[in-house]
């Protein structure tokens, strides 16, 4: 039996670096194993789906899906906790984690595979990661295949010519909000990383290494960039703050979530229920159209289930009401 966890992942996968960041924070013994031809046979023993990250536990159990991986590990290694003791703040952190996984990924994936410069850079990086000892000719051929495959997947996140300026606007607005919030604190909820930090920072870290989003972040979000890198080796540098101290700059992030992410996620779930091939939702006065995706609906249901036991918390309800998040979290 292995004595450590094994993380089969990729440096270009936000969910992989999210899991690795968490294991580093916890000090849990683990090995990072880049998924390529050299590791494929071992990887296939644990992967039910051909995705990363895939984690092999010390008991030789395979785990996939970054959020359940973190939650299972948190139950096994509770200290240092990634959850504020205040239940309202803990839920807000979980809301940000979900937002990072689902909406943050939309911003990252669209930009990574939309413009020519990003396609070329990302495809070549992925090709080299899969062929670490490949010749120039082999890497060039793999780059071409990767680019063809990945540029055909933009519809999963709503990437299109019509949506492109909207998604860039969403990204820049998010950078500005986070820059104000992180300018004078280490992490989203204070001096130590929370669940929400792991979900959102991983997506934005991937943004930071790509030409277009990385340039925008360096120009408009230097504190965000620092946070992304800090979250690659996270540690406890202080306490979680109270809502009163967080509110001036965290409330705008929650309002952003209530303005874009939760309305979009709710519309996606409704479209799936109706069997619609695509849906259009008005976000901040502009129509956004894409095909519905099943996983987003599943994760919205899980978020609502997480909120249900806290529905009687008057203080939390008021925070969610002020940010326009509350209507989307009630069971349907």
Image (cartoon, rainbow, N blue to C red):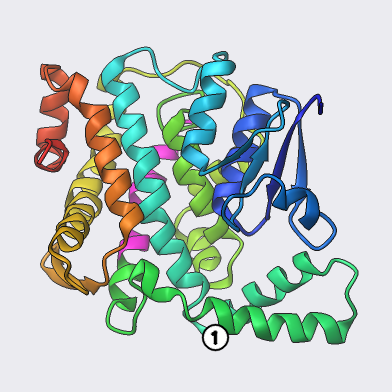
Q: In this view, does 28 lie to the left or right of 79?
A: right
Asked if residue 99 shows in the view, the reply is yes
Q: How crowded is mark 1: few (under 14 residues within 10 Å), some or many (20 or more)?
A: few
- Point out residue 191 in the picture as x, y percentages from the top left corner: 49, 23
**Magenta-drawn stretch contains 126:** no
Q: Which residue is drawn at 12% across and 26% down?
A: 317
Q: What secondary structure characterizes most of the magenta part?
A: helix
Task: Give the labeled residue for mark 1.
Answer: 116
Instruction: Specify the quadrant of the image occupied by residue 93.
Output: top left
Q: How many marks?
A: 1
- State the image quarter where residue 303 is shown: top left
Q: Is residue 134 above or below residue 182?
A: below
Residue nearest the observer in this picture, 119 or 33: 33
In the foreground, 54 or 321:
54
Give the magenta part as a residue range.
170-185
Label 1 sits on a secondary structure element that is: helix
Q: Is 36 above or below relative to 303?
A: below
Asked if 216 appears above or below 312 in the picture, the reply is below
Q: Position of residue 108 (x, y in %)?
A: 46, 62
Q: In which quarter of the image is the C terminus?
A: top left
Q: Where is residue 246 in the image (x, y as percent from the top left)?
A: 31, 27
Picture quarter with the N terminus: top right
* Residue 330 point in image, percent of width and height: 12, 36
For residue 222, say whether it is visible: no
Q: Is residue 159 left or right of residue 289?
A: right
Q: 163 left or right of 228? A: left
């Amino acid at each position: 039996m292995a004595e450590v966890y094994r993380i089969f992942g990729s440096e270009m996968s936000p969910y992989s670096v999210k899991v690795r960041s968490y294991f580093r924070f916890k000090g849990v013994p683990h090995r990072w194993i880049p998924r390529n031809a050299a590791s494929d046979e071992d990887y296939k023993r644990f992967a039910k789906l051909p995705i990363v990250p895939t984690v092999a536990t010390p008991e030789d159990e395979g785990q996939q899906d970054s959020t359940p991986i973190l939650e299972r590990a948190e139950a096994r290694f509770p200290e240092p906790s990634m959850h504020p003791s205040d239940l309202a703040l803990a839920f807000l952190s979980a809301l940000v984690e979900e937002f990072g996984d689902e909406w943050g990924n939309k911003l990252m994936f669209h930009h990574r595979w939309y413009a020519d410069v990003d396609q070329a850079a990302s495809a070549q990086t992925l090709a080299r990661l899969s062929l670490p000892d490949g010749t120039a000719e082999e890497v060039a051929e793999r780059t071409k295949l990767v680019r063809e495959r990945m540029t055909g997947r933009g519809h999963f996140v709503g990437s299109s010519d019509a949506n492109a300026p909207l998604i860039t606007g969403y990204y820049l607005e998010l950078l500005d909000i986070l820059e104000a919030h992180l300018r004078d604190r280490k992490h989203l909820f204070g001096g130590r990383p929370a669940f929400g930090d792991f979900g959102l920072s991983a997506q934005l870290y991937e943004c930071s290494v790509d030409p277009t989003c990385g340039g925008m972040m360096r120009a408009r979000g230097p504190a965000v960039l620092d946070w992304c890198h800090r979250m690659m080796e996270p540690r406890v540098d202080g306490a979680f703050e109270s809502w009163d101290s967080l509110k001036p700059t965290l409330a705008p992030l929650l309002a952003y979530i209530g303005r874009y992410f939760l309305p979009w996620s709710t519309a996606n779930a409704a479209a799936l229920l109706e069997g619609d091939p695509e849906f259009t939702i008005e976000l901040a006065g502009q129509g956004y159209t894409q095909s519905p995706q099943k996983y987003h609906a599943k994760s919205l249901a899980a978020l609502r289930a997480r909120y249900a036991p806290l529905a009687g918390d008057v203080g939390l309800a008021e925070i969610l009401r002020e940010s326009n998040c509350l209507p989307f979290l009630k069971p349907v």
